[in-house]
Image (cartoon, rainbow, N blue to C red):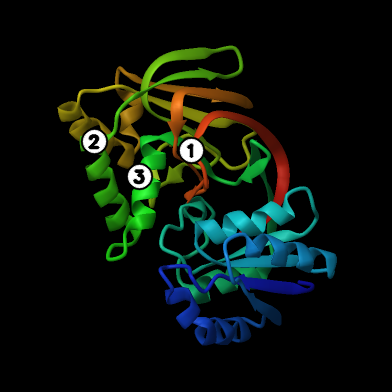
Amino acid sequence: MGQVQVVLNPAADRGRAGERREELSQVLEAAGIAAHVVLTERPGHAIELARDAVRAGATVVAAAGGDGTIHEVGQALVGTKVALGILPMGSGNDYIRVLGIPRDLPGAAAILARGEARIVDVANVNGQFSLNSVGMGIDGQIAADYLRMRALKGELGYLTATVLEVIRFRAFRAEVVGDGWTFTGKALAVSVMNGPYAGGGYCLAPQARLDDGVLDVGIIGDYPRVVRCVVLPKTRDGTYLNLARVHAKKAQRVSIRSDRPLPVHMDGELLPELVREIEIALWPQSLRLIS
């Protein structure tokens, strides 16, 4: 399968990934994968390591971590012939849910060893690449809350943050423009999805496919706080899209404007600064992916 480099984020899964380095090496060896494993040292380092691997002639760069690690490694591989491999060792794992990649390391390593690649879409978001999801509004605030949590992780952590923001989040005025359509009004959240899942398994875009050449846009209008307790849990299985104040759209280009700066997440990673404007453009068939 050519030259493989594994980029391991030891901070993934709240530091547990680093404790599993020896396990990772054993799993790779058992799967017959002769891979060089490098460790990240800081946020953004996985991008640099993946770029170095591309320049060194790697044919596959595998992200060992969570959605954030996959996101960073993917930044370096979009538009190249180098394939992205995934060894899930994080807490969210939304990207792999539709790829047929198991969450256990031996199962994921077997997929990687097989080396079968598919080509998928990504989205350019203000100059960065989103592989899976972009969220502005309450879901961005939920991501911010989740990052501050220490005791809770994974789906339970996201659920706890969601309950907190149901109570306290203040709706914003949004203008969202897609291909031939415009939404203007009060909103709790705007999500732009390449894949179906975000936030640790919330099905925000049931119809989304990674290679269908279109982005799925979900806009949740404003609801009284007591009603939010009914509305937001429906994002778990995608049934929220049937509600009267929810708008489901498709587009290849999307612009979002807010009346105030808001937290935004991309592939589950919170952007470092609050944002008022986002420009998103689909880049079809631009990433090779082992799955």
Q: Secondary structure at mark 1?
A: loop
* Residue 205 appears in view: no
The kind of secondary structure element at disc 3 is: helix
Looking at marks 2 and 1 on the same chain, the residue that comes earlier in the sequence is marked by: 2
**Residue, disc 3:** 142
Q: Quote the CA–CA distance across marks 1 and 3.
A: 14 Å
Q: Residue at x 46, y 82 (%)?
A: 19
* Residue 191 image point, x, y percent: 46, 33
User: Is there CB contact under 8 Å for labels 1 and 3?
Assistant: no
Residues at circles 2 and 3 in contact by the CB criterion of under 8 Å: no
CA distance for labels 2 and 3: 11 Å
Which amino acid type corresponds to the residue marked 3 in the rendered image?
Ile
Q: Amino acid at mark 2?
A: Arg
Determine whether 1 is above or below 239 in the image.
below
Residue where numbered disc 1 is placed? 274
The one nearer the camera, 203 or 262, is 262
In what quadrant of the picture does the N terminus appear?
A: bottom right
Name the mark nearer the viewer: 2 or 3.
Answer: 2
Identify which amino acid the numbered label 1 is placed on: Leu
Front residue of 19/290: it is 19
Q: Please tell me the numbered disc located at residue 115.
A: none
Earlier-in-chain disc, 1 versus 3: 3
What residue is at 46 percent from the left and 37 percent from the top? 135
* Helix, strand or loop under label 2: helix
Which disc number belongs to residue 168? 2
In this rendering, the label closer to the viewer, 1 or 3 = 1
Q: Label 3: few (<14), some or many (≥20) within 10 Å?
A: many
